[in-house]
Image (cartoon, helix red, strand yellow):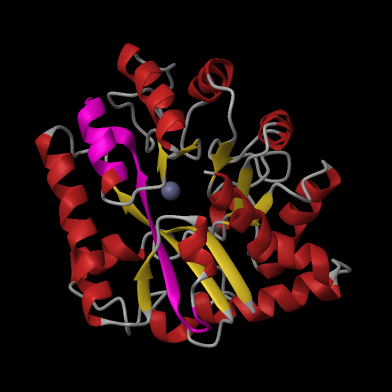
Amino acid sequence: MRLFDLHCDTLGECLRTGKSLVRSDLQLDLERGRSFSRWAQCFAVWIPDELRGEEAVRYFDDAADLLEREAARCPQLCLIRSGAELDSLEPGQCGAILTVESGAAVNGSLGELRRLYGRGVRMMTLTWNGANEIGGGVREPGPLTAFGREAVREMERLGMAIDLSHASERLFYDVAGRTRGPLVASHSNARSLCPHPRNLTDEQFCLIRDRGGLVGLNFAPGFLRSQGKAGQEDVWRHAEHFLSLGGERTLAIGSDFDGTDLPEDIAGLGSMEALRGLFLRRGCSEALVNRIFFENAQEFFHSL
Ligand SMILES: [Zn+2]
């Protein structure tokens, strides 16, 4: 199968625990992706809200260094920065796309933002849950700051995707009003099925759809259902809902591997084939499954 996953936190877990990206007991390792015919994986550097300023920048660099070191010693792992590099991957290889979770990583500096792009960052959530130099997250709502307004303009100029997962609604609509290009919510589900503030309202989803962006389905139980045991069927439920809103070209995968607990029937990267099978059994066409699991994100990445 082909997989393009818009979000995992595995890199940070490796940095924290010293575990290997190649083989580990984490939810994702390279070994379990060997069977994929094509695999693009966004590796997010999550900046905890406690880290700000120079500390946040250093943390980003430590994580990016780790990814580069692993790529240097492991031929299966290729850092990719463009659509052309994505297309030149061999079966079994992991095309790693460096992303950032919380714009605190740029420490309020456009120079830092450009440096991160130079290191390969192709997508960045503006915030995590708290507020930072760019704007307000879900737990500390607020619009773009003056710096945030410059930062989103520069991200559009560079071709670094603006990721609005974790953004507060205020921030979401402020960004939407001040930008013209596609917007992404890399790992968020439907709020009308599970009323969590990290999920998207139908209106937000449709705005992302109309702008040619992407929404990645998140496997975190708390974003899949508010009561009872979550599972693969819930991932399908959210997919079906987004598809009913015309999301055939918007929907993608944003697993959140190693950033969350998982439902019992999702063991990690090794369960992706089974999830794909479930989508097919529920009546999703082969062509549409291919779009959701790979092609929508591939096309988007090409357009950056
Ligand atoms: Zn997240």
Quarter assignment of residue 294: bottom right
Q: Is residue 289 above or below residue 200?
A: below
Residue at left offset 65%, top offset 68% = 231
In front: 178, or 27?
Answer: 178
Residue farthest toward the right in the current orientation of the protein? 283
Quadrant in the picture for the N terminus: bottom right
In front: 76, or 231?
Answer: 76
Residue at left offset 46%, top offset 64% = 85
Q: Is residue 79 left or right of residue 174?
A: left
Residue 7 forms part of the magenta stretch: no
Residue at left offset 17%, top offset 73% = 18
Residue 254 visible at all: yes
Quarter assignment of residue 53: top left
Residue 114, image x, y percentages: 27, 35
In front: 163, or 201?
Answer: 163
Residue at left offset 46%, top offset 55% = 82
Residue 92, image x, y percentages: 49, 84
Q: Which range is magenta? A: 90-117
